[in-house]
Image (tube, rainbow, N blue to C red):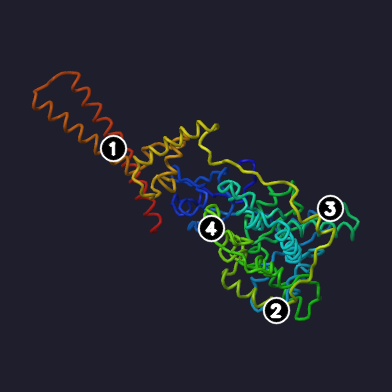
Amino acid sequence: MDKFYHSVRLNEELCKGCINCIKRCPTEAIRVRNGKARINSKFCIDCGECIRVCPHHAKHATYDKIDVLKQYEYTVALPAPSLYSQFNNLDDVNIVLNALLLMGFDDVFEVSAAAELVSEATRTYIDNNPDKLPLISTACPSVVRLIRVRFPNLIPNLLPLNPPIEVAAILAAQKAMKETGLPREKIGIVFISPCPSKVTYVKSPLGTERSEVDRVLAIKDMYPQLLSYMKAVGNDPADIGTSGKIGISWGRSGGEASGLFTEDYLAADGIENVIRVLEDMEDQKFLNLKFVELNACNGGCVGGVLTVENPYVAEVKLKRLRRYMPVARNHIGKEAEDYVHWTKEVEYEPVFSLGNTMMESFSRLNRVERLCKKLPGLDCGSCGAPTCKALAEDIVRGEAAESDCVYYLRESLHKLSEEVSILANDIAENNVEGYEMLKVMTEYIQRISDEMSLLDGRDEKENKENKERRQ
């Protein structure tokens, strides 16, 4: 996984070394070492959960800025369905679409329009592949990456269809080249994203060799600029919208599944809930389901960390907006069908393996189990790892030491103190004198001194950080 691009980054200057992020990361990709968080790129799935929970704003997402429009002769905006849910009292998507044109885009292609094509392709795939049920949605890149590294047994259940963002980009590029006569490299396909996961997908796509999306902008950056352009559009915008209820609904949790016209589905949102569902799927608890829709963000895409509106308020806005829309305005044809299916299989990536061979992995796993018995099992995070088991794995990998556990260190200190006390009593009772006995006692005292210094240093650092947080 280290070969993949990652859109979630750390600003060390803002990081205070707290443990909020390590406790919430779904793949245990974050450690706190020397007072600063560290993101393990092999484990990270760019879900953005650390961005959401960091109180110091030390985690952030990388994406493009609006001035990228100047780099192309012709640009096409791909607005995500969740974009429409950010505005108050919006009753016509054409206002947003025309505002994008006023902002400087030459054309718009709704991702919700492509979502309707994917919904139709999904219905067909379910009917033709009853032996592969339940199928798992592949619309959320973070969920696909999570399955790839943590739930390999579920890879065969992944729906082998491109997400709407990719289908929209392919069709938008085809349309632009046909209408303008420009070569592909002079056309910019720009996605307006609610989350960093889509940024990562564009740089390192799954299911295809290369994404047709050229640039990714954040909804939160576009929002304030769009507001002024939306006022300039007025109340009677040109009708350029191309999607209906099914496509718009993809912006919220359950929206994708509702377009399949079946009640045999499950929809879960929020990365912790997603993990519970995947664990239950591994235990084969959902044998009667046809489809499982999973979104890493709470509320679905409307809850992405690059949005501005509360996800639950945004969900209500999206429902209200779709009220008077037609059910669907797009139907898959021969041309579109060629672009919907995956062209590259997703493979298991064993990033959590403890060794390079099976025997080495088993040997290290036994050592991890022995270490877990020695550690307190409190999962307090004081060592900089999210759990005692994670610390044990870090020790086996050579990335940490047993003394990183504060409780283990204190227990060792007490044992040393008892041994010194016993040694002193033996000397007093037997009236033993001599160089060898004094040497042994000196070594014990030195070990106690060293561990006391280490413990005092940690306490002093924790007190300093707590004082800074209070200030």
Q: Disc 3 to disc 4, how far (Cα)?
A: 50 Å
Callout 4, which amino acid? Lys
Instruction: Give the spatial CA distance, label 3 vs label 2.
Output: 35 Å
Residue 235: % across, % down: 75, 81
Q: Classify the position of the N terminus by image quarter.
A: top right
The quadrant where residue 435 appears: top left
* Numbered circle sitting on residue 91: 2
Q: Earlier in the sequence, mark 3 or mark 4?
A: 3
Secondary structure type for disc 3:
helix
Tags 2 and 1 touching, CB below 8 Å: no
Q: Which residue is mark 4?
A: 285
Q: Amino acid at mark 1?
A: Ser
Q: Earlier in the sequence, mark 4 or mark 1?
A: 4
* Dot 2 or dot 1, earlier in sequence: 2
Q: Is residue 123 left or right of residue 351?
A: right
Q: Residue 245 appears in which quarter of the rendering? A: bottom right
Q: Is residue 316 left or right of residue 38?
A: right
> What is the spatial separation of the Cα atoms under label 3 and label 1, in whole angstroms?
66 Å
When the figure is inspected, residue 34 is found, relative to residue 449, above or below; the finding is below
Residue 13 location (% of width, % of height) = 51, 49
At x 73% / y 48%, what residue is drawn? 208
- Which amino acid, mark 3? Lys
Q: Earlier in the sequence, mark 3 or mark 2?
A: 2
Q: In x, y percent, where is residue 165?
A: 72, 59
**Quadrant location of the C terminus in the rendered image:** bottom left
**Alpha carbon distance from label 2 to label 1:** 67 Å
* In front of the other: 167 or 199: 167
Q: Which residue is mark 1?
A: 412
C-alpha distance separating marks 2 and 4:
41 Å
Per the model, the C-alpha gap separating discs 4 and 1 is: 45 Å
